[in-house]
Image: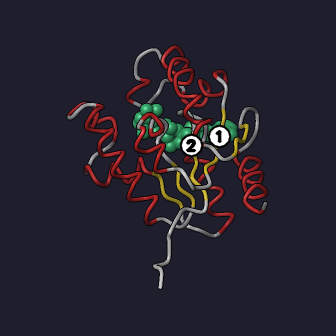
Amino acid sequence: MTAAVTKPLVVLVGAPGSGKTTVGETLAAGLGVAFRDTDGDIERMAGKPIPEIFVDEGEEHFRALERAAVAAALASHAGVLALGGGAVLAEENRAALIGHTVVHLSVELPDAVRRVGLGAGRPLLAINPRATLKHLMDQRRPLYTEVATATVVTDGRTPDEIADEIVTLLKR
Ligand SMILES: Nc1ncnc2c1ncn2[C@@H]1O[C@H](COP(=O)(O)OP(=O)(O)OP(=O)(O)O)[C@@H](O)[C@H]1O
Ligand SMILES: O=C(O)C1=C[C@@H](O)[C@@H](O)[C@H](O)C1
Ligand SMILES: [Mg+2]
């Protein structure tokens, strides 16, 4: 007998401000399933908020916690899973996403900048959020595309509209 495989119904990836957490919560509530966010898992694992992990231990340490959080969540969460904006940087995480339903929430710079504001709570955007976000998005766009099984445009749309489109995609 083979063991039952637990995997997320859908994994959300995208740039900071693409709405992974916001849309993920809306989508999970609509589907009546649990929502999980690897950023939240990392904070629980570390016992402190993400900006403090960056200050106290640095980004490398944060990325190691993130790889562990992604692997654990992919293996154990059956609902909607949001990954951190930089999770796709690790080859290990991109490989782990193969075989999963992965939706890339795409966002262009103007909406992303409006949504993240001055970057509060996002250590990588603490200085010059607009330029930093542009650089991150240019670097990561091919990686989001690589792991995604579908892309949903979020610019100028509400979280409800985006969640509805994902529900439609999942029924296919
Ligand atoms: N479609 C949308 N329209 C307008 N505002 C949005 C939309 N999606 C998210 N927001 C707002 O943008 C901000 C960032 O959203 P959210 O935290 O969900 O992004 P994220 O992709 O999870 O970012 P991060 O990678 O930093 O975790 C929040 O204030 C949220 O309310
Ligand atoms: O874009 C990034 O690299 C990050 C995004 C957030 O979700 C957090 O995972 C953290 O602030 C790093
Ligand atoms: Mg988030």
Q: Which residue is mark 1?
A: 105
Q: Amino acid at mark 1?
A: Leu
Q: Which residue is mark 2?
A: 13
The answer to whether one can see residue 121 in this image is: no
Point 67% across, 25% down: residue? 108
Image quadrant assignment for residue 121: top left
Question: Residue lying furthest left in this view?
Answer: 56
* Mark 1: C-beta under 8 Å from nearest atom of ligand 1: yes
Where is the C terminus found, in terms of image quarters? bottom right
Q: Is residue 101 above or below residue 33?
A: above
Give neighbour class at mark 2: few <14, some 14-19, many 20+ (Cα, 10 Å): many
The answer to whether one can see residue 8 in this image is: yes
- The scheme the figure's colours follow is secondary structure
Mark 1 and mark 2: Cα distance apart in space: 6 Å
Tag 2's secondary structure? strand
Where is residue 150? Give x, y as percent. 69, 45
